Image (spheres, rainbow, N blue to C red):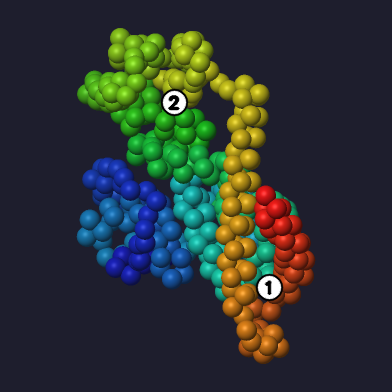
Amino acid sequence: MKVTINDIIVKDRYRKDKGDIEGLMNSIKDIGLLQPIGITKDNILVFGERRLTACFALGWDEIDARVVDVPSIIEGEFSENEVRKAFTPTERLAIAEAVEREVGKRQGSRTDVISFTDRKKELLGVRPQVKDGELTRDFAAKAAGFTSEKQRRRTEKIVKDGAPILVEAVDKGDVAITRAADIANLTKPEQIVSLAGEKADREVREEAEAALLHEVAQHKLYHPANAYTDYIEKHKKRPDRETAAGIGKLLGCQVKADDGTMQPPKTKAQKASEQEARSLRKEEEAIRLQCRSVTSAVGYLANCKSDPAEVIRMIDRWETPAIIENIEHAVEWLTRFAKEWRIHVQENNAK
């Protein structure tokens, strides 16, 4: 449908570099707007900021748009497979972010809480050991048509660190998300050279070399030269995978190859060790968060002086389901905590 451009609301955008808007304007002038932008029913922009910017700069009053029904996507009325087919990877990323915002509203309000909980269980299964924020990101990724949260993270990296030409190549399906995420590890001039190959302009190649040598110079301000920096200074490019793996083994670390991958690849043992370390850090963070929650809860409860019956009469009906669901566990856990706390205090006083 046609929407008045001035009626569209643009909020904070993840993607800061809009790329070659002038080139897009010329393309739209020549062949028109091939793909509509996406908006919510409230006219909030979901995706297509570059297209919107270009059409506004061309003096258009209206633009083709399609309504992205985020509530329907959350409730599963529009399946993940349909989203995957209908939208590009970067559009799916924008939809995932919109899903997260909508979920945040639902979790803080009285409407649709139960239906969203059921939908999340259906899509992901019950995983109580995962923080709700992580579960929501996982849910949003699947609802927006990504095969996994990992694929969503890769797309985020491409949008955040990728040159516009790389982002566009992914949206067109010319470059796979996994490969593009590796290329996004390179400097933006290097990304262009990596995509263009031998067809890359001399000017772009020189820019890539300059950016790479600057990176090496910055490294050498704080660290001594090594086999990797020596290779780059000599050849004015990063080593290929095989050479990078050899240099990495020599240095005892991973180094970046010319395709953006880190070499040598980590062994299963290294990955398992890193995963274990991450899990331990997450567990520690979760316990620290619980420490703050318990301290706050005890403080708030200690300030409760009114008759519980009076408090119950004043509680809104929409808050009742949450209390019913949590009260028994909260009392049982607080009782255990109080018992352990008394033992802890006695032992410390004894010392």
* Rendering coords of residue 32 (x, y %): 32, 51
Q: For the N terminus, give its image quadrant.
A: bottom left
Q: Which residue is mark 2?
A: 260
* Rendering coords of residue 343 (x, y %): 74, 57
Q: For the residue marked with disc 2, what is the amino acid?
A: Gly
Q: Nearer the viewer, residue 279 or 121?
A: 279
Q: Which residue is mark 1?
A: 322
User: Measured along the vertical axis of the image, is residue 263 above or below residue 4?
Assistant: above
* Rendering coords of residue 122 (x, y %): 72, 57
* Rendering coords of residue 339 (x, y %): 76, 62
Residue located 63% across and 52% down the image: 287
Q: Give the SS element for disc 2.
A: loop
Q: Residues within 10 Å of mark 2 (few under 14, many from 20)?
A: many
Q: In the figure, is residue 300 to the left or right of 119?
A: left
Q: Nearer the viewer, residue 315 or 113?
A: 315
Q: Residues within 10 Å of mark 1 (few under 14, many from 20)?
A: few
